[in-house]
Image (cartoon, grey):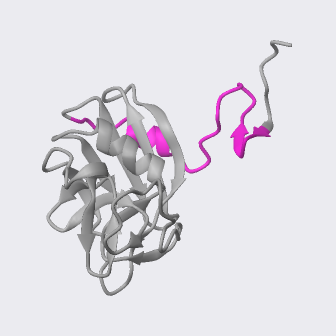
Amino acid sequence: DGTIATNTTIDGRKIGANGAVADPYGYDKKAQGYSSETRYMVLVDKSRHLFNMYKGSKGSWVNIRRNIPCTTGKSSTPTKSGTFKVSKNVTRFGPYGRMDFVGSTVFYTTRINAGNFFHSVLYKLGSTNPYTTSPKDATLGKNRSNSCIRLPLADAKYIWDNMRRGTRVVVY
């Protein structure tokens, strides 16, 4: 009927008293203090295994991917904390940004820094198309990677399509 939804949950997102999506962990406020050489910026909260992506600029970031579950490094190969810039343009290994790691194939790989990438969940080694095969390990929200940040396929693709060299990535 055109009225603004308040104090409710819609599609798993909490809506506050002002009709805006609630930010229970303060990510949006935290983001405002960072700058990026591109119009995108990313926050990764390793303790909650959540990924947030912003578009805009310092002081006026708008969240475009909110609280996406991600998988970060296990204790033997932890994901590094810090402030980084995407060090290379989106890596493109064949169709779908395909890259083979030990025992698995991932898609839509974007290099954060030496040894760390954003990429999809794991697929069987040698897979060539993520849309015609099922994931080998679609686990999210855990410490299971070899330091990379695993994301749902659609979010890994969004990064692959949009993030470029100089995009700020904050991992904590």
User: Vertically, is 95 above or below 15?
Assistant: below
- Quadrant housing the N terminus: top right
Give residue 158's position: percent from left, percent from top: 39, 41
Q: Residue at x 26, y 80 (%)?
A: 102
Q: Is residue 152 left or right of residue 125?
A: right
In the displayed orientation, state which residue is furthest to the bottom: 76
User: Vertically, is 29 above or below 81?
Assistant: above
Q: Residue at x 52, y 64 (%)?
A: 48
User: Vertically, is 3 above or below 62?
Assistant: above
Check residue 19 for magenta coloring: yes
Residues rendered magenta in the picture: 9-36
Check residue 161 for magenta coloring: no
Q: Residue at x 71, y 41 (%)?
A: 14
Res. 116 image quadrant = bottom left
Q: Is residue 166 left or right of residue 154?
A: left
Q: Residue at x 75, y 30 (%)?
A: 17
Magenta-highlighted stretch: main secondary structure? loop
Q: Is residue 69 left or right of residue 130?
A: right
Res. 37 image quadrant = top left
Give residue 90's position: percent from left, percent from top: 21, 46
Give residue 86's position: percent from left, percent from top: 19, 48
Give residue 95's position: percent from left, percent from top: 27, 50
- Quadrant housing the C terminus: bottom left
In the displayed orientation, state which residue is furthest to the right: 1
Res. 129 image quadrant = bottom left
Foreground residue among 128 and 62: 128
Q: Is residue 138 left or right of residue 3?
A: left
